Amino acid sequence: MSRYLFPVLQLVIEWKERIVEGRVSMRIQKINFRDQKAICVFPTERVELEQAIVGLELADRYPVIVLIGGVIAPQYAGATWKAIQIISRLAEDLKALVVCGGTAMGVMTEIGRARSQNHYAFPLLGMAPEELVTWPDGPRGTRFLWWGVKRWQLEPHHTHFILVPGRQFGDESPWIADAAGILSKGHRSVTILINGGEISRGDVQLSLEKGRPVIAMGHTGRLADEFSRQTHRHKLVTVVSATAEQRIVDVVSASLLERE
């Protein structure tokens, strides 16, 4: 009998499934990165998002910065790094939470690096499709030539993760938009676009539909620069040069400081 029971008990302990109000809650796991541990939750439906956020064990609700964008082209690397340094300092000073895609690439790597190098304490939440990511001792990709699935590493300086159902990047976008609203209850939220492609275009649209202002960082390439060239744009979209430090401080602060 015990030889059948042991694997079951081991699975329960490994994934930290908990009984809450007479039912089994979603998976909660601690990820052991080299320099820190991060809490990760695995909701299966969007109606579970508030419960997932409770599982993150965050201290409170926050002003929220939704950071969107992707791979950084070399010619924009300097301006992008300057903008991310300013954004990370603002997050620290304003006691804000930053949410982004959470994988170890592009803008998401740089915000993690800025937080780590400056020894900041603001919560950094990554949200991505579970089937497309991995972590230390996590699932392996099955990609071989053009078959299978490639998994991307989670960025190791994020403090929290919500991994959601989905088979392609962009499936997490509605979850991010909803999470920003839940996490910023009683405060305000803003979306900041750095470079960006079609997934970011969808993120921007979701933010605008929720009445969330969008700040596009000019001189970072792709979608952000497309906004900077537009003569007519949505009233909630503001374009700021990625190298204009005081202007970034003023616009982001104005977007977040007024309580709702």
Image: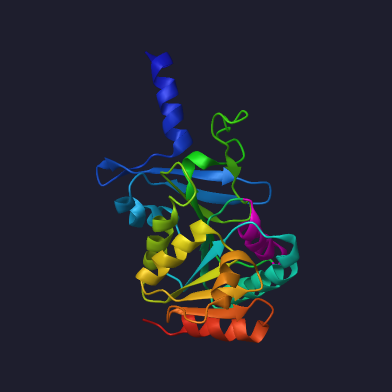
x then y, percent, for residue 128: 49, 50
What residue is at 48 percent from the left and 63 percent from the top?
Answer: 201
**Residue 196 place in picture, x, y as percent:** 57, 62
Residue 89 visible in the displayed image: yes
Residue 109 forms part of the magenta stretch: yes
- State which quarter of the image contains the C terminus: bottom left
Residue 136 among those drawn in magenta: no
Which residue is more in the foreground, 211 or 249? 211
* Relative to 11, 218 lies left or right: right
Where does the magenta region start and end?
104-118
Look at the picture and state if 27 lies above or below 121.
above
The residue that appears at 63% across and 63% down in the rendered structure is: 111
Tell me what residue is drawn at x 41 percent, y 74 percent: 212
Residue 170: percent from left, percent from top: 46, 52
Q: Is residue 183 visible?
A: no
Q: Main secondary structure of the magenta part?
A: helix
